[in-house]
Image (cartoon, grey):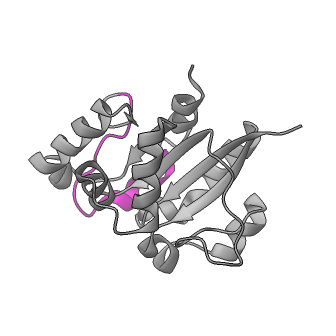
Amino acid sequence: MSSKVLYLMICGAGPAHHIDVMITLAIDAGWTVHCVATPAAAQHFLDLDALKKLTGNPVRTGHQGPSQPALPPADAVIVAPATYNTINKWAAGIADTYVLTQLAELTGLGVRIAVLPFVNTALAANRAFLRSVDELRQSGITVLFGEGGFVPHPPRHGGKIMDTYPWHLTLKAVSAT
């Protein structure tokens, strides 16, 4: 029995320390998970060996090397936690990391993508960020931001909401038909 392929794009933000929660939810829902991490996530937030053990797949942190197998085609993509930086660059068409290059391509291919931001109220109030969220939504991306999604926290209070970060909403979004 083959399962659906999920790319989990992981950015460098606090919830990345708890990415095992997202992975376990996805595996329990029948997804084969392939983690792709930004440089900040890989360097500061993730235990790559533990993620490989959990998913059965190595974490991709850069472009495919000559000895690496290609990732299988994605049935869906989850970007979580999605940072201010990644959301703004992606919406602007900047592809200066492997994650952003993949997101640009997957957007163009029309793959189902759900984004779960992790930003504070000051960043969320920035007009550039709000334009970026709108741009991604106009491109067919589900951005789980605001009521019914991720609600920003006050600056320097992100650690207080780790237990309530709504990972489950992303699976619902990519599983909807």
Q: Residue furthest front?
A: 66
| Quarter of the rendering containing residue 18 | bottom right
Q: Which residues are magenta?
A: 148-164
In the figure, is residue 62 to the left or right of 82?
right
Where, quadrant-wise, is the N terminus in this rendering? top right
Q: Is residue 114 above or below residue 123?
A: above
Q: Position of residue 149 (x, y in %)?
A: 38, 34
Name the outermost residue toward the top: 177
Quick check: can you spot residue 7?
yes
At 55% from the left and 62% from the top, the residue drawn is: 36
- Tell me, yes or no, whether the highlighted magenta stretch contains residue 93: no
Q: Residue furthest left?
A: 127
Query: Residue 50 location in percent, x, y?
Result: 71, 71
Residue at left 42%, top 42%?
A: 107
Kindly identify the residue that appears in the image at 66 percent across and 78 percent down: 66
Up-down: is 30 above or below 95? Answer: above
Q: Residue 138 placed where, x, y %?
A: 28, 31
